[in-house]
Structures are given as C-alpha cells and as structure tokens.
Image (cartoon, rainbow, N blue to C red):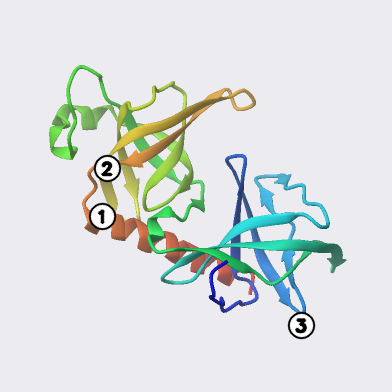
Amino acid sequence: MLDYKIKLNVNQNLEIIENDITYKSSIQDIKNEYILIGMPISGSKYMMIHIGSIIEYYIANEKEVFKCRSVVLGKTKEKNIQLAMLSFPEVIERVQRREYFRLPIVMDVKYFILPENRVYIDLADVPIGYFKNLEKTVTIDISGGGVKIISKKSAKHNDFILLSIKVPDEINVLCKVVRCDYDEAGKNYKIALRYEKIDERLRDKIIKFIFDKLREQSKLFK
C-alpha cells in the first residue's frame, strides 16, 4: 500500500476490470466510515460482488490515475438505486502514465487490417491507397496506450491495423493487434490494439479526450 490519500468526490467515476471486462460505477455518497458506490455495470450486466470480498479499481483525477482496493462492507438501496458500501480506498499503485487508464466508450472509428506482405515501422510506411479501404466500426474502450474495437473480421496477434479516430479531431494511427477474441453472442470479433510508434502529441490528444469525457460523464450525474 502506498502512503497516499486520494481526494474523493461524489459522482467521481470508478473503473473495475475483472476477467477482461470493464465495469463502471461512481461514488454516490461519502460517509464517515465508508463510501457508497452504484452497483458496477458493464453494458446491461451487473458485476457480482460479495460482502467481505476485496475489489480493485481505478480512480482518476485530471492528471493521474490510482489503482485502489476496498473491502465490500455491505449492500443497501436508496431511492431505488442498488448501492455497495466500500471501505475507504487503499492506494496500491499510482499510475504515472495516464495512457494506461481505459475509458469504456462506444464511438465510431474506421479501420483497415493491413496486408502482411510488407513491414510497417510507422504510419509513413502505410501506402496512401490503403486509407481508401477504411471500414466503419465502433470502439469498446480507449486509452492513451491503445483501443479495443469490434470487427467482423478476425486478426492475428501482431497484425498491423490502420486506425482513424476522432478525438475530437480526426487522427490516423498505426496499431498492432494485442489480442483478438470471438464474441459468440455478437457474432463478431473484439480486437485489442496497441498504438505503434505514435507521435506523443497525438497521444496527448487522446489522453485529453479521455479526461474530457470523464468530466462530461461526471456532470451528467450532478
């Protein structure tokens, strides 16, 4: 545990990642001995949490992200909202590189799986003609280090993908496939991508976009 205290606020967002599923929640109230959060949810699926269990999660402020853990002290219901009672966060990791924070978000992007018959060191190695082959899809989440997208096509580990994304200006990024899983329910593929040789100015734009979205989400609950 790090000797660090986080400033907590009502409506502050939490992100819980369990078995590669990202669950979202937010702080609903702060009591003297515990905090109340909404039951973590991913899409329409609620996370199963048990009293006495320990959960790990991420909390972000404007500049940093903290990995924390809390004990689930109980469950309650207020104004027809299911809530979980957590002990105050213990900071177990201070994430200096904000690009590792993943924002669950569905947004339009374009992509193209690049042919394997050439080497792609950076974006300059991608032939101009390939930009005409971009196909529309959506994201599952995004970070300053990579993005996860939906695809009708399979991709192999270490394949290169050309990505066009608005953050909010449209930028092009060369990506490499980290993981590709078939989603039986959706009959499509979920592809996790890592930015490859990205200009740090573009990375900063992506990170700013993520934290702007976090602030927008917080305002929705006020």
Decide if residue 199 is on the left or right side of residue 147: left
Question: Amino acid type of disc 2?
Answer: Val
Q: Which secondary structure, mark 1?
A: helix
* Image location of residue 52, percent across then percent down: 81, 57
**Picture quarter with the N terminus:** bottom right
Question: Amino acid type of disc 3?
Answer: Asn
What residue is pinned by disc 3?
32
Relative vertical location of residue 107 with respect to residue 168 in this rendering, above or below: above
Quarter holding residue 44: top right
Question: Amino acid type of disc 1?
Answer: Leu
Label 3 to label 1: alpha-carbon separation: 42 Å
How many circles with numbers are drawn on the protein? Answer: 3
> Earlier along the polypeptide chain: callout 2 or callout 1?
2
* Image location of residue 4, percent across then percent down: 53, 75
Label 2 to label 1: alpha-carbon separation: 9 Å
Which residue is at 72% across, 56% downward? 54
Which residue is at 17% across, 21% downward? 118
Quarter holding residue 63: bottom left
**Picture quarter with the C terminus:** bottom right
Asked if labels 1 and 2 touch by Cβ distance under 8 angstroms, the answer is yes
Asked if labels 1 and 3 touch by Cβ distance under 8 angstroms, the answer is no
* Image location of residue 158, percent across then percent down: 33, 27
Relative vertical location of residue 196 with respect to residue 40 in this rendering, above or below: above
Q: Residues within 10 Å of mark 3 (few under 14, many from 20)?
A: few
Q: Which secondary structure, mark 3?
A: loop
In the picture as drawn, the residue positioned furthest to the bottom comes out as: 32
What residue is pinned by disc 2?
173
What residue is pinned by disc 1?
202
